[in-house]
Amino acid sequence: MTSRRHFVVSLPALVAATAGAVRHGVTRAPRSSDHPEPRPGITAARVLTRDQLGEHKDAAPVFDMVRAIPQVVDGIRCQCGCASMESKYSLLSCFEAEGMAGHCEVCQNEGRLAYRLHKRGKTLKEIRAAIDAKFG
């Protein structure tokens, strides 16, 4: 049983964690090191285009970046809290279907960082470590 003092001391952290999860419709946060393996033959065919983004057309440049490196982004666990959702396999999933990344700054910033590091020749392992350090 938790003491009242322990409960009061830990309350701010509990509220912050719960608020993040509720905001994204999940009940638990992913472990930062729990990255998926890129699926064989993965393509960017399902990444939304500017025309499909509707009111989020300003996010089109990052969708284009992700479209250029689907095999990398598919090997990264999204750190915004959506990874617990059944339909989300990887960060790539955030740029497909309903296009959650259109309004989520965490998804967008992870996509930008992955693209930038990939263009600098970083390995998937190095990109994952950078994502974990910044967003995990």
Image (cartoon, rainbow, N blue to C red):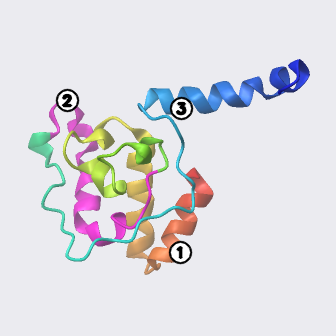
Q: Residues within 10 Å of mark 2 (few under 14, many from 20)?
A: few
Sequence order check, earlier mark of 1 and 3: 3
Left or right, 29 with reference to 83: right
Q: Amino acid at mark 3?
A: Gly
Q: Quadrant of residue 65?
A: bottom left
Q: Is residue 121 part of the magenta span, yes or no? A: no
- Separation of marks 2 and 1 at Cα, in angstroms: 34 Å
The span picked out in magenta is 53-78
| Labels 1, 3: front one | 3
SS category of the residue bearing label 1: helix
Categorize mark 1 by other alpha carbons within 10 Å: few (<14), some (14-19), many (20+): some
Instruction: Place residue 55 in its image quadrant.
Output: top left
Q: Which residue is mark 1?
A: 126
Identify the residue under disc 2: 55
Residue at 56% of width from left, 64% of height from top? 130
Residue depicted at 83% across the width and 26% down the height: 2
What residue is shown with label 3? 20
Residue 88 is at least partly visible in this image? yes
